[in-house]
Image (cartoon, grey):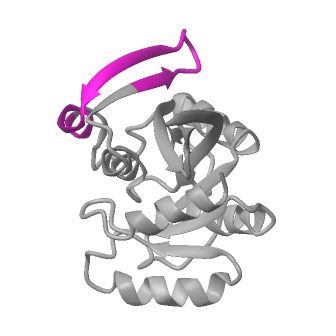
């Protein structure tokens, strides 16, 4: 299969909505067995680390807010027709409505916002049990004018989230809203189809 171009995709959203787990499990869903993760810290040189999928989940996923303190990217191969595109999928720091007291978190949020302008795809991960407000609404407003923007209504494996995802889809029209579960991979086929259509 021939290799086509390279496009950037940003996974964005509030802290603890499942961005990192989505990134790792979506890479696995697309056939990755090992992840070469590029870390781009603000105060140092970029570096890469090689992980098994299990190691990546153990080392990078955490219940504490702001576990991800820099942009971290993996390169995925996404076939479309007779060619395979390389999609640089970048996980990012969770955004908040308020100015965070920790300077490292503030700098990481600023890097996330800068990455928005450089990304062809913006995958906005939200918890559909929580009404969109503040920074999530700001991202949605930006995304309405961006063809590569989709809302991923995560955690639909949990009670009440599926109904929240349906309500969100009605409220966000004409934006694409995909109910997903970063844990069970529900909806990942639809996310892949969304990306493929825009390559």
Q: In the picture provided, is 157 more to the left or to the right than 78?
A: left
Q: In the picture provided, is 121 more to the left or to the right than 182?
A: right
Image spot of residue 3 (x, y percent)? 57, 32
Can residue 107 be seen from the camera position used here?
A: yes
Residue at 67% x, 69% y is 137
Q: In the picture provided, is 73 more to the left or to the right than 23?
A: right
Image spot of residue 163 (x, y percent)? 40, 90
Q: Which residue occupies the extreme right position in the image?
A: 145
Residues 17 and 22: in front is 22
Residue 148 on the magenta segment: no
Image spot of residue 88 (x, y percent)? 55, 36
Numbered disc total: 0
Image quadrant where residue 40 sits = top right
Image spot of residue 82 (x, y percent)? 55, 46
Can residue 94 be seen from the camera position used here?
A: no
- The vertical placement of 163 against 95, above or below, is below
Residues 197 and 142: in front is 197
Residues 184 and 135: in front is 184
Range shown magenta: 37-58
Residue at 28% x, 50% y is 63
Residue 51 on the magenta segment: yes
- The vertical placement of 167 against 132, above or below, is below
Image quadrant where residue 188 sits = bottom left
- The vertical placement of 76 against 99, above or below, is above
């Amino acid at each position: 299969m021939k290799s086509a171009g390279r496009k950037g995709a940003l996974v964005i959203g509030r802290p603890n909505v499942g961005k990192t787990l989505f990134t790792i499990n979506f890479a696995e869903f697309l056939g990755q067995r090992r992840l070469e993760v590029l870390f781009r810290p603000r105060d140092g040189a970029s570096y890469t680390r090689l992980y098994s999928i299990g190691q990546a989940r153990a080392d990078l996923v955490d219940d504490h807010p702001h576990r991800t303190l820099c942009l971290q990217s993996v390169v995925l191969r996404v076939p479309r027709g007779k060619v395979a595109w390389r999609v640089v999928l970048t996980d990012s720091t969770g955004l908040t409505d308020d100015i965070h007291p920790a300077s490292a978190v503030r700098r990481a949020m600023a890097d996330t916002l800068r990455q928005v302008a450089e990304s062809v795809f913006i995958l906005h991960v939200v918890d559909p049990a929580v009404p969109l407000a503040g920074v999530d609404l700001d991202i949605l407003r930006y995304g309405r004018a961006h063809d590569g923007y989709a809302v991923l209504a995560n955690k639909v494996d949990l009670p009440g989230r599926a109904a929240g995802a349906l309500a969100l889809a009605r409220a966000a029209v004409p934006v694409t809203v995909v109910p997903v579960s970063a844990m069970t991979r529900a909806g990942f086929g639809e996310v892949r189809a969304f990306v493929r259509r825009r390559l």
